[in-house]
Amino acid sequence: MTPTATRAMPTTRFTVGPSATEPPEARGLARDGVRLLVARGDAPPVHGRFHELPAVLSPGDLVVVNTSDTEPAALPGSRADGQPVLLHVSGPAPDGGLVVELRTPDGRRVTDARAGEPVTLPAGVVATLGAGHPDASRSTGSRLWWARLPVEGGLGPWLAATGRPIRYPYVRVARPIEDYRTVFATPVPGEFASAETPSAGRPFTVAVLDGLRARGVGVVTLVLHTGVSSPGADETPLPERFRVPAATAQAVNAARARGGRVVAVGTTVTRALETAADTDGVVRAAHGWTDLTLGPNRPARVVGGLVTGWHEPEASHLLLLEAVAGVELVGRAYAAAVERGYLWHEFGDSCLLLPARGFTRRAR
């Protein structure tokens, strides 16, 4: 497990753009028809469409995607006093049990939950809140909780029958779970996948993947299962489960050796690859839990490009972007996205950050 970096705040500052309230398919676009802003080195941003991604990259580059599936992890429930809530299953805790989050039916955080509180869920299942998570000393007011959730027959089948995708208030109408899955999502029986979609990969289509390969750009996979998002400004990323296969590690090292760029699709891929990298940037097969936080004290060693969506300005998200692409490039990209009205969040538009070759990521 990699040590967590010292807490810092990002340098990039921006206003948030408009939220995508529905998938592009509901707006008359294909998945790969969303806008793509390409921010490259010192050049002005280039605006296009996601299906043009293969033409932007170079032969010999390598794209790394996350194959984690998305769970229907939101469950309607009620507290002991009858108050309705939504329980979000974030995923397993490193030391056993589950991590959950409580929200009101309209998406606000529940701030008065207490350890020991029961939450009644569909089919008569009762979740019992334990200690706060990750701070086990908290017995009230925690955003996340360790919880006992006894389900006869297993968690997966029960969620499939009773759960629905986690949805935030900016998405006005409930969408089916298929809208939250990427084209390369691969379910693993008995394995709890991501509580929320690894959204950077959503605009990919079979046509885009075929176009990358025809261009001479490799595509390889890894897995990182994400928990619930929307951390507070003072929260560091939680530990997450990941798996970097030997074939992916070999492909990454070979691409870097021949001068190709390793392009991570999302912060999830970046975190997994950087966890599996040694101090010289050599990636080895690895699996387990990562608590790595990228930032000024731990810049990226392997990832030389990043496909990302546009998200709320949490400190940890921006620190990771800056660790890959630098403060200036991230700042210019976000400013251009706001000016052009790019759409935010999981159903929104995309960005490709390509720092200049030889760019040095300096600690602040």
Image (cartoon, rainbow, N blue to C red):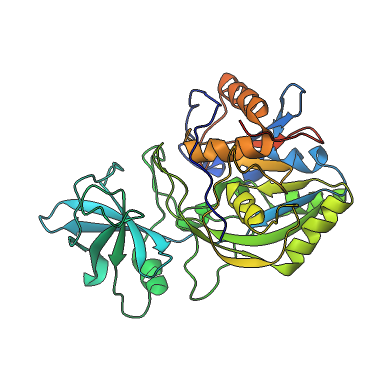
Identify the residue at horizontal 79%, vertical 43% (top origin). 54
Name the residue at 74% across, 62% down: 249
Indicate left or right for 57 with 23 as reference: right
Quadrant of residue 67 within the rendered picture: bottom right
Using the image, determine if residue 351 lies above or below residue 80: above
| Residue 264 place in picture, x, y as percent | 68, 48
Residue 301 in view (yes/no): yes
Who is closer to the viewer here, 39 or 55? 39
Q: Position of residue 334 (x, y in %)?
A: 59, 26
Depth check: 73 or 206 in front?
Answer: 73
| Viewer-nearest residue: 168 or 249 | 249
Q: Position of residue 255 (x, y in %)?
A: 83, 53
Residue found 69% across the figure and 60% down from its top: 221
The total of numbered circles placed on residues is: 0
Q: The C terminus lies in which quarter of the figure?
A: top right
On the question of residue 27 being in view, the answer is no
Residue 358 in the image: above or below residue 131: above
Percent position of residue 354, x then y: 74, 36
The answer to whether 33 appears left or right of 289 in the picture is: right
Q: Is residue 20 above or below residue 205?
A: above
Residue at 59 percent of width and 47 percent of height: 267
Position of residue 94 in the picture relative to residue 77 (left or right): right
Q: Quadrant of the N terminus?
A: bottom right
Q: Residue at the top extreme? A: 339
Residue 349, image quadrant: top right
Query: Residue lying furthest bottom in this view?
Result: 153
The quarter of the displayed image where residue 32 is located: top right
